[in-house]
Amino acid sequence: MRHFNLGDFDYIVLAARWTVLLSLYGLLTGGVIGVGIALLRTSRSVAGRVFAIGYIRLFQGTPLLLQLFLVFFGADMLGLPLGAEMSAVLGFGLNAGAFLGEIWRGAIQSVPVGQVEAARALGLGYFPRMLRVVLPQALRIAIPPTVGFVVNMIKSTSLAAIIGFVELTRAGQQINNATFRPFLIFGLVAVIYFILCWPLTIASRRLETRLGAAYQR
Amino acid sequence: MKCIRFLIGALLLVIMAARTPAGAQTIDEIVSRGSINIGVLVDLPPYGILNDKQEPDGYDIDVAKLLGSYLGVKVNLVQLTSPNRIPFLLTNKVDLIVATFGITPERAKSVMFSIPYSAIENVVFAPKGKTITKLDDLRGLRVGVPRGTVQDVLLSKSLGSAVKISRFDDDPSTYQALLAGQVDAIAETGLTGDLFYAQHPEGNIERKFILLQQPNGITMRKDQWSLHQWVDTFVYFTKNDGELDAFYQKWFKKPLPNLPTF
């Protein structure tokens, strides 16, 4: 057993960059998949809707921990060793894709149907209708649940420890296992998570007010 | 959590069943590759910890490095956690594991153990006022253990529902729980407990009795026969020439216990 030193402090603070990077890349991947899923889920094509529903059910219905486990060890069995970083990004991306897709599907569908009908009546095709009429209105509705999901996801990156990815929580555990100072170490870890998540909540409120300005009466 | 562990267990079986026979890995392959990937734990002091430079260190890590130097290859240490040790091994992500892995017939169904290279002493700790001298004295008490460990299995098996077992995720939480009075006694690694409670004299906690001595083996896949033979030879040799004893003295301030062999 040894004492907590400045190097341990740096080790934990620096491990936060893996939490940030994993969240960022996971979200980018998930965002791309999510847009695709939301559009398929609201499209007229039956095959597209069935696929999107199946995808969402699969990823919402199984624990994230197992999805990470399957991507990491499963890829190896298929002869594609991805490594812990790639597997974690892919695992979080696939999972976030399902949740974001469902959140954005709800936002798209909550745009009053009259808007879509009016756009059709004006002769707008699918893409201009989506891009210029539906999505701008859906965006405002989608912000609070999206930010809620992102904050949750930042905190669940700690699950990546199962595949050997050392991020904030895991780094804290490792140092605690050597120094036995749980209150100090997990207190520090909690403060870092708070510093990562709090600005997002503030930014979300600002963005909501700004986008909502047009609807103030 | 229990359900997730069960699912992981089930997945593991699938992975084991579906694993394509990549051909048994031989010692020659590792030597000609020039490096060996060794899985270690860094959260079990003093067997494996992060030292004050945040690098892996400890008894297991010293053994792993010595093994590499006898093989004449570079050692890549891979940091594992106790639940992902077997999956990493079975999917060829590590060549072998030096991670205080207790030798049990149950585990030997899926992996292969070398002869013991270390032992871990499981001790029951409790506050000084309590009279606990044998297993039966634990009846009716709340006993803390790290989840899924040998002591967890032993207590559940021998006392069953007569003892209230509280399972914690790792060693520090288990030690802390006794200090905080959440449990009446714990079954834990003797040496680490001695150090921890020496730092917290206000808890008035002492050793009660030794629950068991658990010998640990270096762990390999079931088809690594030639590597297994070499590792046994390595353990035998370094035990006889005093190198393992020197590591044990360094980390535990005690001579290497008498290790049974098979």
Image (tube, coloured by chain):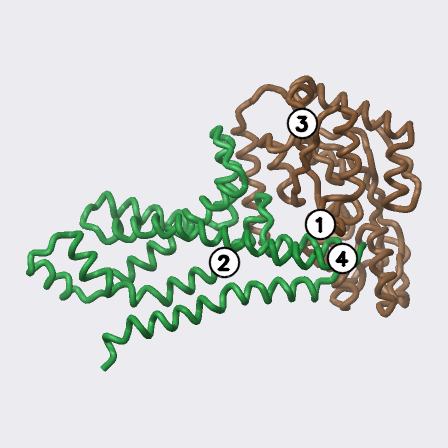
Judging by the rendered image, the residue that carries numbered circle 3 is B35
Q: Are marks 3 and 2 on the same chain?
A: no
Residue B34 placement, left or right of B132? left
Q: Nearer the viewer, mark 3 or mark 4?
A: 3
Q: Chain of mark 3?
A: B
Instruction: Quickly name the residue at label 1.
Output: B54
Disc 1: which chain? B
Element under label 4?
helix
Q: Chain of mark 2?
A: A
In the picture provided, is B118 more to the left or to the right than A49?
right
Tag 3 near tag 1, CB within 8 Å:
no
Cα–Cα span, label 3 and label 4: 32 Å
Q: In this structure image, what is the colour of chain B?
A: brown
Image height of B110 relative to B172, above or below: above
Chain coloured green in the rendered structure: A
Which mark is nearer the camera, 3 or 2?
3
Helix, strand or loop status at disc 3 = strand
Q: Position of residue B241 (x, y in %)?
A: 91, 28
Q: Amino acid at mark 3?
A: Ser
Q: Name the one closer to the observer, A39 or B162.
A: A39
Subunit under mark 4 = A
Asked if disc 2 and disc 1 are in contact, CB closer than 8 Å, the reply is no
Please indicate whether residue A52 sits to the left or right of residue B62 in the image.
Answer: left
Q: Specify whether residue A60 is in view.
A: no
> Residue tagged by mark 2?
A154
Query: Residue A127: x and y, percent?
Result: 17, 52
Q: Same chain for the residues at labels 3 and 1, yes or no?
A: yes
